[in-house]
Image (spheres, rainbow, N blue to C red):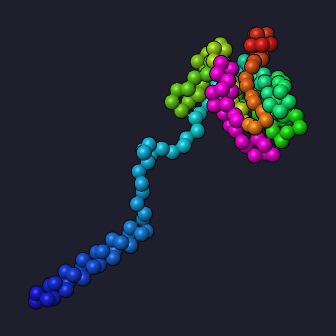
Amino acid sequence: MKTLFRSTLLLSLLLLLVVGCSKQEEEPAKKPSPHGNITKQEAKVVVPESVAGHWKAVKIAVQDKEKSSEDIYTVDIGYSFKLGDSDLRLKVTNFLPHFVMDGMTLTSLSNDPKNPAAQIVITEKGKPVFKGWLFSLYPNTHAFQHPRYGFSLVGYVPTNGEKGKKG
């Protein structure tokens, strides 16, 4: 009787080990992230009614490091331009005259150009290489790094007779 009990107990333990091992193989242990469970989420851009339609274009300075030159392009919001003989195309998607970040929302506190920022997308040979912001007051913040070109926001053009920076 003791032998039968021991055999059943041993068989049960062996079965538990086999089932437990196979479940571990099916579901590998997840290592916790040192930053917790973070998923990359894109910030939402909200252009307030007090800003929408009040700005026509932005002025972007493009520095050519090889030629030691700079050209200023006026680009309408929502439009793009091809950069000279390069394979780069720059599109201005949004302009916020008083840029602020509130959690995952990017917006403008007012229509006054207190912290002007332009959201741009740069593509090379049709593929996106940069999506981010150019800041007039902080030109090096999150700046796009390119071996030949540098980009900065140097002005903005209102839709009506209001004056924009540098023109």
The relative height of residue 12 versus residue 50 in the rendered view (above or below) is below
In the drawing, does residue 74 fall left or right of residue 55?
right
Q: Quadrant of residue 156?
A: top right
**Residue 78: percent from left, percent from top:** 76, 31
Q: Residue at x 16, y 84 (%)?
A: 6
| Magenta stretch encompasses residue 131 | yes
Apparent side of residue 54 relative to residue 45 in the rendered image (left or right):
right
What is the quadrant of the N terminus in the image?
bottom left
**Is any atom of residue 115 visible in this view?**
yes
> Residue 110 sits in which quadrant?
top right
- Image coords of residue 39 (percent x, y): 51, 45
Query: In the depicted view, which residue is nearer to us: 104 or 150?
Result: 150
Q: Is residue 57 visible?
A: no
> Which segment is the magenta one?
122-145
Q: Position of residue 70 (x, y in %)?
A: 83, 24
* Depth order, front residue of 50/61: 61
**Going 15% across and 88% down the picture, which residue do you hit?**
4
Farthest residue, direction left: 1
Residue 46 to residue 130: above or below:
above
